[in-house]
Amino acid sequence: MRGAQAIVTILLLSWLVGSIDAGVWQAVTGIQPLTLLACFLVFASAQMIGGFRLWLVTPGATLRGAQAATWVGYFWGNFLPSSVGGDIVRLMRLRAEGIPGATAAGALVLDRIANLLPILAIVAFAALTRSLSFAMNIDPVWGIAFALVGLAGAVALWLVRGRLAGPIRRALQPARQLVRRPGLALGVALLSAASIGVSILAQWWLARALGLAIDLVELAQIIAVLTLVVMLPVSLNGLGVQEAGYVAALTTAGAPLDAAIAFSLLVRLLMLATSLLAGLFVLSEKLQARQASGAG
């Protein structure tokens, strides 16, 4: 699997690099540095908002611990060759804060779901309005297949319910907390919408700076669909797939090829810059730990 993903990644990135010409560089260098900085700050703020959300959904977590888990997880998630690598790091970070493993795992699953709901809502809206030319109808056979897999999983859990009673109860603690406290659930929902919203806003601002004549709603639909697509294990961490998707979607919407390629490259730059910001957080923690051990 990893070998196939690596091949796909190399092929797509080779195509992308080979497509960079003078027009692409002109589009990239034509953006004012302050505009690019503003886009980066808005884009990176999604992680801070995500840290607040993780704090709300994790019983017993401190705000500092939730923020640390979010930033450290984002950093490693962009470099580990797995879509769940960042979640594993976040789990380890929460456990280091004293959160039981099952509770931390349940909170991370809940956090993922909360982050995914606004994206699914946007995709559902796009599918209903049929405003995306590449939207596809789902074959009912797939729905039946997923239902059967879910049923099989439920039966398997029921058969081993005695052994898993304790861990499952702890894993469901974050969800039960939201059910008992509607105000907390509303806060989580608002933070999820805000996290996705600032990410979309930053990319729309970037598109406008490149001169792309695309409205906010249409770009939000493209971003939401591609967010789901890059979750598929096609390439390593979505590298190449995201860029090719942006180019295909934007050119289909009427954008010039050079501007579409420039946009895909700059979005990846925003992600890498945010990862480096998260890396500074990781570095500061290591330096503090070294100073503490030296003082001891």
Image (tube, rainbow, N blue to C red):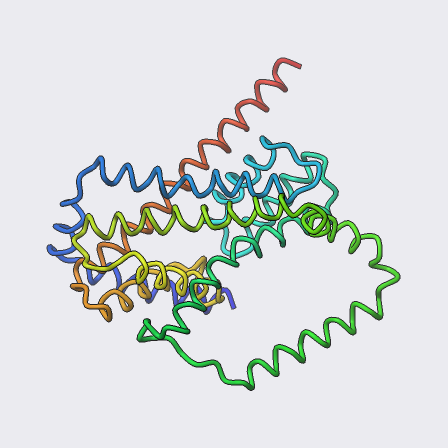
Picture quarter containing residue 42?
top left
Q: Is residue 238 left or right of residue 51?
A: left
Q: The C terminus is located in which quarter?
A: top right
Picture quarter containing residue 19?
bottom left
Residue at image position (11%, 55%) is: 22
Query: Percent x, y for residue 180?
Result: 72, 48
Query: Percent x, y for residue 156?
Result: 78, 71
Residue at image position (55%, 52%) is: 85
Q: Is residue 25 left or right of residue 141?
A: left
Q: Nearer the viewer, residue 37 or 176?
A: 176
Query: Percent x, y for residue 226?
Result: 39, 63
Residue at image position (52%, 58%) is: 116
Vertical relation: 202 (above or below) 129: above
Q: Is residue 42 left or right of residue 83?
A: left
Vertical relation: 225 (above or below) 39: below
Residue at image position (13%, 45%) is: 30
Q: Nearer the viewer, residue 27 or 294?
A: 27
